[in-house]
Image (spheres, grey):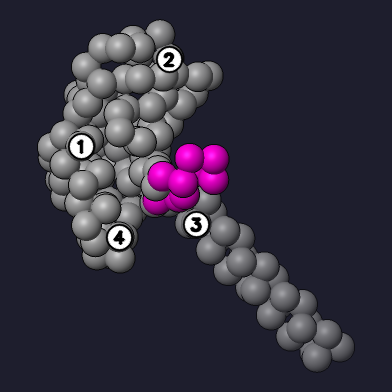
Amino acid sequence: MPRRKLFTMVGIVGALIAIGVFLFMWFKPHRDIHNELEVFNGTATELYSELQNDPDGFKLKYVDQPIVVSGEVVSKESSIFTISPNHLCQLDSTLSMDIIVEGAPISVKGRLVGIEEDELMGDLLIRIDHVRPQ
């Protein structure tokens, strides 16, 4: 009987620890990119030329970092718009695409997710998410 009580107590304590870890991880505050200092602040053309000059250094320097980019909106879809040249921006989920005007100049802040190759055109695309206009 004492052995059974010991196993029951260990099981209860283990379950409480597991629940505590789960709740700690679940309610952990998320990263607020818009309150962080940006590692790049300039035009989309400057950022794209830096990518073309040194793609590997670009990845090390900018991926998963907040940046501010300005340029012209060349197209927009349901939640993604493109800043010339080749910057795919995903708008922050709390904002509406109504604030984005095609053909207008814009300055945005977001997290640079990475780069990918456009299979059709062969160009490199810079992907930015959590974008908010400045």
Q: Could you give the CA–CA distance between mark 2 and mark 3, rounded to whole angstroms?
A: 32 Å
Evaluate if marks 4 and 1 touch, with contact meaning CB atoms under 8 Å apart.
Answer: no
Q: Tag 1's secondary structure? A: helix
Quadrant containing the N terminus in the rendered view: bottom right
Are the residues flagged by discs 1 and 3 in contact, CB closer than 8 Å? Answer: no
Callout 1 amino acid: Thr
Q: CA distance from mark 4 to mark 1?
A: 15 Å
Structural distance between the alpha carbons of marks 4 and 2:
30 Å
> How far across and down, in percent of the image, does residue 38 sit?
17, 45
In the displayed structure, 56 sits above or below 125; it is below
Q: SS class of the residue under badge 2?
A: helix
Disc 3: which residue: 25
Residue 55 shows which numbered tag? 4
Question: How far separated are the C-alphas under marks 4 and 3?
Answer: 35 Å
* Mark 1 vs mark 3: in front: 1
Question: In the rendered image, which residue does mark 2 sit on?
Answer: 97
Residue 39 picture location, percent across and down:
16, 50
Q: Does 75 appear above or below 21?
A: above
Disc with the residue nearer the chain's start (2 vs 1): 1
Q: Element under label 4?
A: helix
Comparing 105 with 91, the one in front is 105
Task: Name which of mark 4 and mark 1 comes first in the sequence.
Answer: 1
Query: Magenta residues, as a range?
Result: 115-123
Residue sticking out furthest to the bottom: 3
**122 in magenta:** yes
Three-letter amino acid code of the residue under disc 3: Met
Residue at which label 1 appears: 45
- Find residue 127 and report its image quarter: top left
Report the mark closest to the observer, 2 or 1. Answer: 1
